[in-house]
Amino acid sequence: MVSAEGAGRVASGFPGLPGAVAVSHLSVYDWPAADGVCGGSPHLHLTCSEAYVVTGGRGAVQTLTVSGYEVTPLVPGTVAWFTPGTVHRLVDEDDLRITVLMQNDGLPEAGDAVLTLPPEYLTDPETYAAATAVPADVPEEERERIVRTRRDLALEGYRALRDAGGPEPLAAFHRAAAALVRPRLAHWRKRWEHGARAAAAATGDQLDRLERGDVSHLADAVVRSEQPVEYGKFGMCGRLDVYRGT
C-alpha cells in the first residue's frame, strides 16, 4: 500500500521522457519498390502523432489525408510532424536518417499502426497479422524478405488509395483500421493512463503545489540516461535503434 506521502511523490513527477514520448533513431530503407522509389511501408497511426527530426541524408515523406496527397522534403534540420489518420510513406533519396518522436510512448509498439494493405487483408485481425507479422526466430535475411514483401503489399494498397477518385476509399480504410485495433483498446487505455495521462497529471500536481507555495517536488529531481536496448530492428519505415521507454 502506498502512503499518502508516497502517493504525492508519485503524482508530483513522471519518470519517463518529457510528455511520455518515445524516441528512436531511424535509417530509412534504401530498398527500391516497383515504382522505382526507395523507402518504407505506408501506414497510419490511430491515436499517436509522429514527428521527424532529420539528422542526416535526404529524402521526403509522402502523406495522404482527406485533404489530399502531399510530399514534404526532408533534409538535415527539418522537423516535420503529422497527426493520427495521416497515411505516410518515408522515401529515401540519400541515406536518410531521422530521430523519431512518437506520442503516447508504448502505444505504437502495442499496435497503433495499420499498414495500407489491400482491403482483402484488412478483414480481421488474424488475416492482417498473417500478412504483417515478422517472426523473431528466423534468420535476418528471412526477416528482411518478409519486411520487403509486406512493404510491397502495403504499397499496392497505398497506390490504390492515392489514385482513388474520391474520399470513400480512404474513409473505408480508416474504418477497417479502427475495426482491426478495437480488441486492443482496453490495453491501450491502460498504457495511456500510465503514460501520457500520468505525465499531464504530474504537471497539474506541480502547478497545484506551486500555488500553495509547496516546492517539495523539486527535491525529487532525478537525472537519467540510457543507450538503445536494440539496434537495427526492422521497422515499418527502416532500421530502428530503440530505447526502453517508460
Image (spheres, helix red, strand yellow):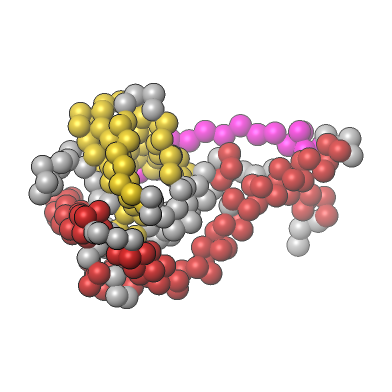
Q: Can residue 143 be seen in this view?
A: no
Looking at this view, is 184 or 72 the one in front? Answer: 72
On whether residue 228 falls in the magenta region, the answer is yes
Is residue 244 highlighted in magenta?
Answer: no
Residue 132 position in % (x across, y down):
25, 62
Say which quadrant the N terminus sits in. bottom right
Residue at (61% x, 58% y) in the render: 193
Identify the residue shown where x is 73% and y is 37%.
220
- Residue 127, visible in the rendered structure: yes
Percent from the top left, x then y, of residue 91? 24, 39
- Position of residue 17 relative to residue 41, above or below, is above
State the residue lying farthest toward the right: 212
Q: In this view, does 110 lie above or below 6?
A: below
Quarter location, residue 147: bottom left
Residue name at image x 59 percent, y 42 percent: 19
Q: Which residue is drawn at 18% across and 58% down?
A: 156
Residue 158 position in % (x across, y down): 24, 56
Extreme residue toward the front, this view: 165
In magenta, the rendered stretch is: 216-233
Quadrant in which residue 61 is drawn: top left
Q: Is residue 204 left or right of residue 142?
A: right
Q: How many marks?
A: 0
**Side of 130 relative to 184 (left or right):** left
